Each structure stands twice: as C-alpha cells, then as structure tokens.
Image (tube, rainbow, N blue to C red):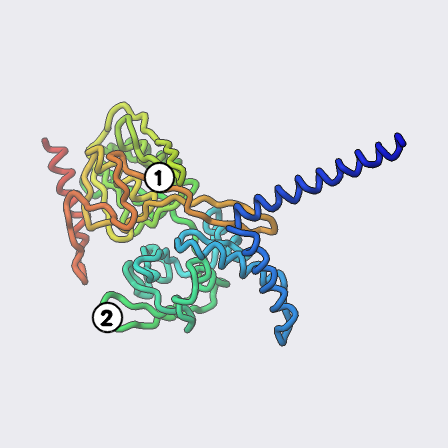
Amino acid sequence: MNKLKEWLVAALQVIFIIVVVLATEFYFVQKYTGSAGNLTRLFRVMKIVEDRYNGEVDKDKMFEGAMKGLVSAVGDPYTVYLDQKSFKNLSEATHGSFGGVGIVFGKREGKYVVISALEDGPSAKAGVKGGDVIVSVDGEATSSMDMEQIATKIRGKIGTEVTLELKYKEEESRKIRIIRKEIKNPSVAGKLLDDTSIGYIRISMFNENTGEDFKKTYKELEDKGMKATLLDLRGNPGGTLSDGVAVAGMLVPKGPIVSVTDKHGKTYTENSTLEKIKYPLAILVDGGTASAAEIVSGAVKDTKSGKLFGVKTFGKGSVQSIIYLGKQSAVKVTTAKYYTPSGVSIHNKGIEPDVIVELPEKPTFDNQLDAAKKYLLEELNK
C-alpha cells in the first residue's frame, strides 16, 4: 500500500512538472508570436514546402529566410537580420578593411540614397555623389532588397567589378562601372591652414579609434600653435556613438552632449566634463553628415560652442545595437532614439546650420570652407 502511495505521489510530481513546462512554453509562445496559432502556421508552411515543393529544400535557408522576413516586417531600414555573410561584412567594416567601392547609404522616403562617397575612394573617383539614389546593383533592382543585401552585393573581391545604376534628383538614371578596391576605415586627419593659426581637422567616419585619433591630432595642432578649430564633418555618415561623444566632449562645455531614450522611456545622458571652451570653433556640415557626426554638430549648435556652416544634415537620430546569435549571425536592431542637448530629435529632419552656404554645382573653390575660415579669422581678431 505504501509503495502504491509513493508511486502515485511520484507520478503526480511528474505530471505537475510536465504541466508547468507546457504552461511556460505556451506563455512564451503567446508572448513572442502573438498566438500559438502563428507558430503552428509557420511550421505548417515549412512542412508544406518540404513535402510538396518539386525540388530540393534546404531547411537552413528556409529558417534564414524566415528570420530575415520576421525582422524586416517591423519596417525600419536600420533593423535587419545579419546572416553569416552580412555579419562578416559588418565585422570587417567595423574593425578592418574590405573590398568595396567606398560609399555609405541610407533609406529616405522608400529609396536607398547615397549619404556620402568616401573621399579618394573608387566611387567618388567614378562620379558617385551624395544624394544619388541607388536604383540597381548589377542589374538587380534595389526595391527588392534590404540595406544589408544591397551592401553585401556591392562589396566583393578586390579587383572585381560592380555596376551601379544611379539617379540624381530629376536627372536621367546613369550606370557606373566601378572596380572594387580595398576600403580602409578612415578616421582623422589634421593640419594648420596656410598662414593661419586655424587647425583644420577632417573626420571622414566615426570608428572605434576616432575618439583617440581626434585627441591625438588636436594635441599635435595645439603644439604647432592652433588658436581656432575648423572641423570638417561633410560626408561623414557617422559610426560609433561613443566616439562621437568622445569628440564632442573635447569641444563643448560641461553639461549634456546627447540623451538616449529607449522604447520603455528610459533615458541616459552623455555629458561633457570640459571646464572651458578653448578655441573659436566652426564645423562644416552637409547632406552627408549623419548619425554620430550629427551628435557632435547638434551638441555644438545647441550649446553655442561654435557655428555650423554648410547645408542641412542627413537626419539619422536613431541608435542601433548588435545582438549576437549563434553560428556567426546577429540582429542589428534600432533600440533607441537620441536627442540633442535642447531635447530635439533630428531623426528624418536633420540639423540646419547657423550659416547656410550652398556649394555650386561645379565649384571652382571650397566656398563653405572659405566662409568658415573667414568667421574664425574674425573671431581671432576680436
């Protein structure tokens, strides 16, 4: 009798555990798929294709496709699933060099638009310019691809060719054949402008070394006699937020640089600890100035630490995080929006410069740089 009782107790414990596990699984299925029926439909579709498709079925590719579709359904061009190839491309772009054409692009009004063609890169030399709409890559329409698919298709082995079909404003579309070259992550370069004490610093992109490189270049120019700073952020598509904050922290006084707010309303603020602005400052911006470059520009404008010269910036005010998965894959997801010190979101709006200076279609000299230089010379002569 005692043995039967023990057996019943043990059986009830097992049943209880099974019920708890099933209930937990059901809860998470409901929470993350909307209903158990959605998950059932997914597996049913996969089973139908596997059983009835008149050809070979690669289950791994089916899962990859399902994950890409799931992530892209949120409708944000910066939120994407990174398969093994895309993941590899992202790692190379962040840490090393890769074979490509030297352009950075984003999505605007449903079209893929060149933010900037990196100076001295193969695209810039071939005539690609900021504002060009990418219509197709090697004959395949970009309307059928997401941003990572386009980037993957543009990149490739050094020395190989890719054809971009581009359209600028109301002009007829044009096709450009470009030979892929090694693209190294640009960072910081600086010099004193001729016969002046104005330190000219060019940042082409914000990568994981930009903060330190800027600090080093800034100090070198100080040692050479810099008394005013001209920062060129034209065509800078951004990059790592932390390095944008590091650069801004050397230019704006103690106080907020940028605040970041996630989907739950939680906000954290990055602050400058600089006691005093050292030198008069001018920043050059244009339609290719985006993301981390706009963090620097917005902080300077809002704190009146200097003046912005050029034309309105691109307007990318969102923050992406990389969530790593197994098998060298990841999800890049927009996790937050950022706001300038005055609490303004520049997403899809951009930043208006203090002094608007348009570059002519065929400039004979850099009138934007010239306007900023004249301003700084006036400040030095006060």
Which x, y percent locates residue 249?
A: 32, 32
Label 1 amino acid? Gly
The residue lying toward the viewer, choosing from 73 and 118, is 73
Residue occupying the point 84% across, 36% down: 7
Q: Is residue 272 above or below residue 210?
A: above
The quarter in which the N terminus is drawn is top right
Residue occupying the point 89% across, 33% down: 3
Q: Under tag 2, what secondary structure?
A: loop
**Quick one: label 2, few (<14), some, or many (20+) residues within 10 Å?**
few
Residue occupying the point 26% across, 31% down: 252
**Quick one: label 1, few (<14), some, or many (20+) residues within 10 Å?**
many
The mark total stands at: 2
| Left or right, 36 with reference to 113 | right
Of all residues, the one furthest to the bottom in this rendering is 54
| Left or right, 197 with reference to 173 | left
Q: Is residue 167 above or below residue 329?
A: below
Of all residues, the one furthest to the front in this rendering is 1
Which x, y percent locates residue 270?
A: 35, 31
Whether residue 228 is visible to the viewer of this picture, yes or no, is no
Residue occupying the point 60% across, 46% down: 26
Q: Is residue 89 above or below residue 53?
A: above
Whether residue 340 is visible to the viewer of this picture, yes or no, is yes
Residue to which mark 1 is pinned: 244
The residue lying toward the viewer, choosing from 138 and 177, is 138
Residue 264, quarter of the rendered image = top left
Q: Earlier in the sequence, mark 1 or mark 2?
A: 2
Which x, y percent locates residue 72?
A: 45, 56
Label 2 amino acid? Glu
Residue to which mark 2 is pinned: 171
Of all residues, the one furthest to the left in this rendering is 382
